[in-house]
Image (cartoon, rainbow, N blue to C red):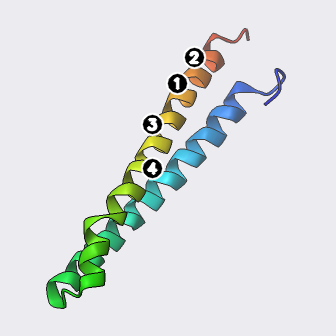
Amino acid sequence: MSDHDDPFDIVERLLAEQQMKLHELGELVGEYRRLIADVREQPTIDRVRLARGLPGTRYRINIEYIRQNWLKLEVELARAFDAPK
């Protein structure tokens, strides 16, 4: 990012990233639901192990990205609306 970037362009880019990550998070939750349904039907050791560990980590990483991106977005929104017209 350079000092000459239009703050509204930056806000638009950050909002697009936020929307994409939230969509990915929804897909991830769908994957977890399918995994739990599979474990319920056929609780193999591998499925149970996966259901207990990996999904929570991926979810938390995505949530943290969304949180950090939103903080950047708030800064850029303030900059966009405080910019001289």
Q: Which residue is mark 1?
A: 74
Mark 2 packing: few (<14 Cα in 10 Å), some, or many (20+)? few
| C-beta proximity under 8 Å, tags 1 and 2 | yes
Mark 3 packing: few (<14 Cα in 10 Å), some, or many (20+)? few
Residue type beneath disc 2 = Ala
Badge 4 element: helix
Q: Image quadrant of residue 20?
A: bottom right
Residue beneath the point at 28% across and 81% down? 47
Residue 28 image point, x, y percent:
39, 65
Residue 21 image point, x, y percent:
50, 53
Q: CA distance from mark 3 to mark 2?
A: 17 Å
Q: Which residue is mark 3?
A: 67
Q: Which residue is mark 2?
A: 78
| C-beta proximity under 8 Å, tags 3 and 2 | no
Which label was assigned to residue 61? 4
Please name which of the two marks, 1 or 3, marks the residue nearer to the observer.
3
Residue beneath the point at 19% across and 91% down? 42
Please name which of the two marks, 4 or 3, marks the residue nearer to the observer.
4
Q: CA distance from mark 1 to mark 4?
A: 20 Å
Badge 3 element: helix
Please name which of the two marks, 3 or 2, marks the residue nearer to the observer.
3
Outermost residue to the bottom: 42
Badge 1 element: helix
